[in-house]
Amino acid sequence: MAIDTEFGWRGARRTLLVVEDNEINRMMLSAVLEEDFDVIEAEDGFEGLERLEAYSQDIALILLDIYMPRCDGFEFLRRKAVDPRFDTVPVIVTTAGGSIEDEIACLELGANDFVVKPYNFEIIKNRVNNLIRLRESAAIVNILTYDDETGLYNKDFFYHEVEEAFARRPDAQFDLVVGDVENLASLNDRYGEAKCVRLMRDIAGRLTELLPKCIARGRISTELCAFVLEHEERDWEEMLALDTDGLVVPNASVKFGVVENVDRGMPISKLCGLARSTAATIRGRYGVQVALFDDELHARQVLEQTIRESMESALGELQFSVYYQPKHDVHTQHVGGAEALVRWSHPTVGFISPGLFIPIFERNGFITQLDMYVWEQACKELARCREADLPCVPFSVNASRLDFDLPDLPQRFAAIADKYGVDHALLHVELTETAYADNPQRVIDTLHELKELGFSSELDDFGSGYSSLVSLNTLPLDVLKLDMSMVRKATELNDFRIVESTINLAQVLGLQTVVEGVETAEEARRVTEIGCDYIQGYYYSRPLCVEEFEQYLQRDCVSRASDEGEGR
Ligand code: C2E
Ligand code: CA
Ligand code: CA
């Protein structure tokens, strides 16, 4: 389709196709039209179709004779009409004498206009100009309205239509559905762009069938389709049961976010954002297709946004602090270490749980900056303990899987420790198996480097969901931390055999063990009996702020001295 960037008639010369068997007529027509157009000629319908095939992108209009040998004008029109590449190219039929039946037959076959022989060239030129202008304006409207891959409205027109509908119906209530085709970018890499274009078109088609009574349907980004319907009580699960069988890409999946009774005061783009993040809450969850936006989700989204917007300044304004949870050494019966755990006290929101902000920081990458900050605070605190003559126990600091993407992680850790003159043996890095799963070799290499620099490493959350013996065998670890879910389950079943075999396995591999989440005297007794080395849990202490932690160390120091006194 030859559309100039400059909308109007004064652009580049258009190309016409003249299909006419009479040589004199053809030459006359061409000679006149060549003043304003590029002209391609054909002697009959077949040749005309060949030219159309060869120049389909360029031809702006066809002048067609009816009576020609081999393939006449009717046959030409018939064949042109069934080919979607050509069916919008306008046709002016040239008739001699003008039979009404012929004209009707041509119109039925898709011709747009007529000129009668003998030719009046002024009339022909005007009709050609008018038709081309008309067709190109329609094409531009089409481009401004539709997404050419799916046939849905494009984003801007969809937003426009929805806002118009809201304005026209001030009392009506509307529901919004956004369908998110999962992992479209990786499907694109894997199956190629052409297949993914077809996938989106087929999905849009199937969704249009599922949601027939829409106010508007639009494609609002590469992987998102949006639908606005008048509000009704609906079973969304049933309504959005999209059949993915037979799609060009196997295992394609669509997650839906639904906002019922949308807040009409909010711009439609924002509403789509809400529906989209609602859909994102079930991303990757097998068997769940639809998520409904509700107040709780809304509150969470607002909080998540606050978290994202304030994280940078929070670091500068020292809103993050580090708490220390003591680890009880089973052999000495005294404090044998502590885990550094970050806390966020937000000026307006108040206390925010790390369970909430850490996953967000892991998604946006901020976690690495925060982990460096926690590492530095831990080093500072170790230096303070040394200066205050408190017992110096090793601190374990959490490292997110993203930290392992830093090529110089060990050197950075070392530089910070050295800045505070802290013995590297007093610093342990806690990592989870997800880090290993992401990039095994990189994690192995990094742990080796950390070891060479004198740091220890602990595998955290072992036994929580995904755990593999391969990581235990291949990672150069010093400590294994049993996830608290193992103790919870053992207590519930009154069966500690899995805890016991895990600890035995760690011992065989030469690893020390920490059992996390010990909350009762009975749990402490059972895991002590089994032979773990350290216990961390509320039974001994919750995570403590710096002052409390120092007091804890102080008390431990005193009781250690009295133990030693008694022992003497
Ligand atoms: P985690 O590394 O497994 O840390 C242990 C969590 O269990 C801590 O929660 C701790 O307060 C809690 N806990 C300790 N003993 C008990 C117990 O007896 N019972 C129960 N129910 N819970 C206990 P917290 O501080 O809320 O931290 C949650 C998670 O956030 C941590 O789990 C860790 O994955 C992450 N996290 C915390 N601080 C940091 C950090 O500085 N960097 C990174 N990357 N992650 C951190
Ligand atoms: Ca940890
Ligand atoms: Ca843990």
Image (cartoon, rainbow, N blue to C red):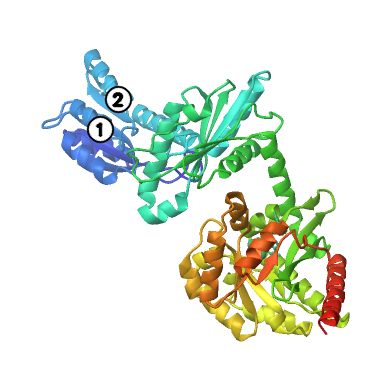
Front residue of 18/72: it is 72
- Name the residue rendered at 78%, 85% in the picture: 421
Secondary structure under the numbered disc 2 in the rendered image = loop
- Furthest toward the left, the residue is 70
- All told, the count of numbered labels is 2
Residues packed near mark 1 inside 10 Å, few (<14), some (14 to 19) or many (20 plus): many
Is residue 567 toward the left or the right of residue 116 in the image? right
In which quadrant of the rendered image does the N terminus lie? top left
- Quarter of the view holding residue 115: top left
Q: Is residue 80 visible?
A: yes
Q: Which comes before the other along the chain, label 1 or label 2? A: 1
**Image-quarter location of ligand 1:** bottom right
Please provide percent x and percent y for residue 430. 64, 69
Task: Tell me, for residue 110, which label it has, or none.
Answer: 2
Q: Is disc 2's CB within 8 Å of ligand 1?
A: no
242 lies above or below 435: above
Expressed as whole percent of the image width and height from the top left, the position of residue 549 reads 83, 68
Q: Residue at x 63, y 78 (%)?
A: 456
Which amino acid is tagged 2?
Gly
Residue linked to disc 1 = 80
Indicate left or right for 244 with 273 as reference.
left
Q: What crowding class fits label 2: few (fewer than 14 Cα within 10 Å), some (14-19), or many (20 or more)?
A: many
Q: Amino acid at mark 1?
A: Lys
CB at disc 1 and ligand 1 closer than 8 Å: no
Q: Pick whichever, 113 or 35, lies toward us.
A: 113
Residue 403 placement (x, y as % from top left)? 62, 69
Quadrant location of residue 246? top left
Residue situated in front as seen by the camera: 139 or 539: 539
Relative to 130, is 5 above or below?
below
Are dots 1 and 2 in contact, CB under 8 Å?
yes
> Viewed as shown, does residue 123 lie left or right of 438?
left
Instruction: Name the residue: 67% across, 70% down.
Output: 534
